[in-house]
Image (cartoon, rainbow, N blue to C red):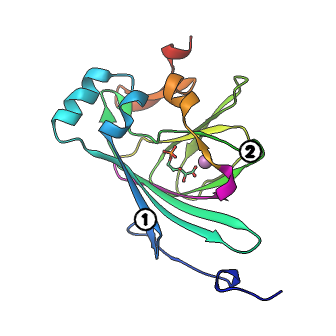
């Protein structure tokens, strides 16, 4: 087989201090106004938008497409903060392709990785730097930052996985992570019961 340019090995350089890598192909930003539907306190959402619509998280992305394969690398940096009593978090999604897993690697910060299936299985994994989690196919996934500094994680997956946001946008995860008496606590999501 004649190798094309994209069939050769390729590296990006991760900056552990900043929590991002270069080169990157794309950067996406998510502000409170992009995420209003996922937080339970809509008054707090409106207030934050009014106060300047703060950044919640950024995604840095690189796709490794070759003649035979399609890996992707994403780094997500979630800012510290809360909407009302609910910690900042990613939108969360299922993969469109039902046979596609993903690896998440926590680099900085502390929080939770929430995962659940359509059948009602639920897991909250306490996350700290160095925790690496394999997310099996058909488990929705969301990361919550409960620390007072940015939480950074690296994701690796096949581009073919796709992102399906609707089920989570509509009803959220089975549990929410909120601050009670200065500490993170998992509580039932009333939208689901
Ligand atoms: O592919 C992934 O699972 C991640 O790169 C996420 O897309 C990223 O963490 C942002 O989360 P979400 O896509 O749920 O907004
Ligand atoms: Ni994913």
| Residue at the bottom extreme of this rendering | 2
Label 2 lies in ligand 2 vicinity (Cβ under 8 Å) = no
Mark 1 surroundings within 10 Å by alpha-carbon count, few (fewer than 14), some (14 through 19), many (20 or more): some
Residue 144 seen anywhere in this rendered image of the structure:
yes
Q: Is residue 158 magenta?
A: yes
Give the structural element (helix, strand or loop) at label 2. loop
Query: Mark 1 or mark 2, which has the lower sequence index?
Result: 1
Q: Residue 168's image quarter?
A: top right
* Location of residue 183 with respect to 72 vertically, above or below: above
Give the residue at mark 1: 19
* Location of residue 133 with respect to 142 vertically, above or below: below
Q: Is residue 129 magenta?
A: no
Is residue 102 found left or right of 74 in the rendered image? right
Please state which of the two labelled residues, at mark 1 or mark 2, is closer to the viewer: 2
Task: Specify start and end residues of the magenta stretch as a single range.
Answer: 148-161
Q: Quadrant of the N terminus?
A: bottom right
Mark 2 surroundings within 10 Å by alpha-carbon count, few (fewer than 14), some (14 through 19), many (20 or more): some
Q: Position of residue 99 (x, y in %)?
A: 78, 46
Give the residue at mark 2: 136
Residue beneath the point at 75% across and 41% down: 98
* Location of residue 89 with respect to 10 vertically, above or below: above
Q: Position of residue 4 (x, y in %)?
A: 69, 85
Residue beneath the point at 17% across and 34% down: 50
């Amino acid at each position: 087989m004649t190798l094309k340019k994209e069939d050769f090995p390729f590296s990006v350089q991760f900056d552990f201090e900043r929590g991002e890598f270069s080169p990157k192909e794309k950067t996406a930003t998510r502000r409170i106004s992009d995420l209003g539907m996922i937080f339970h306190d809509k008054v707090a959402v409106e207030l934050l938008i009014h106060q300047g619509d703060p950044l919640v998280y950024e995604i840095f992305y690189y796709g490794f497409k070759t003649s035979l394969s399609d890996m992707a690398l994403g780094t997500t940096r979630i800012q510290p903060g809360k909407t009302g009593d609910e910690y900042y978090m990613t939108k969360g999604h299922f993969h469109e392709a039902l046979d596609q897993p993903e690896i998440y690697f926590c680099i900085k910060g502390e929080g939770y990785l929430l995962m659940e299936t359509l059948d009602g299985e639920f897991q909250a994994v306490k996350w700290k730097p160095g925790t690496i989690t394999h997310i099996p196919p058909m488990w929705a996934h969301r990361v919550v930052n409960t620390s007072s500094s940015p939480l950074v994680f690296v994701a690796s997956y096949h581009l073919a996985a796709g992102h399906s946001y609707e089920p989570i946008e509509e009803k959220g995860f089975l549990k929410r992570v909120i601050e009670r008496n200065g500490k993170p606590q998992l509580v039932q999501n009333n939208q689901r019961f």
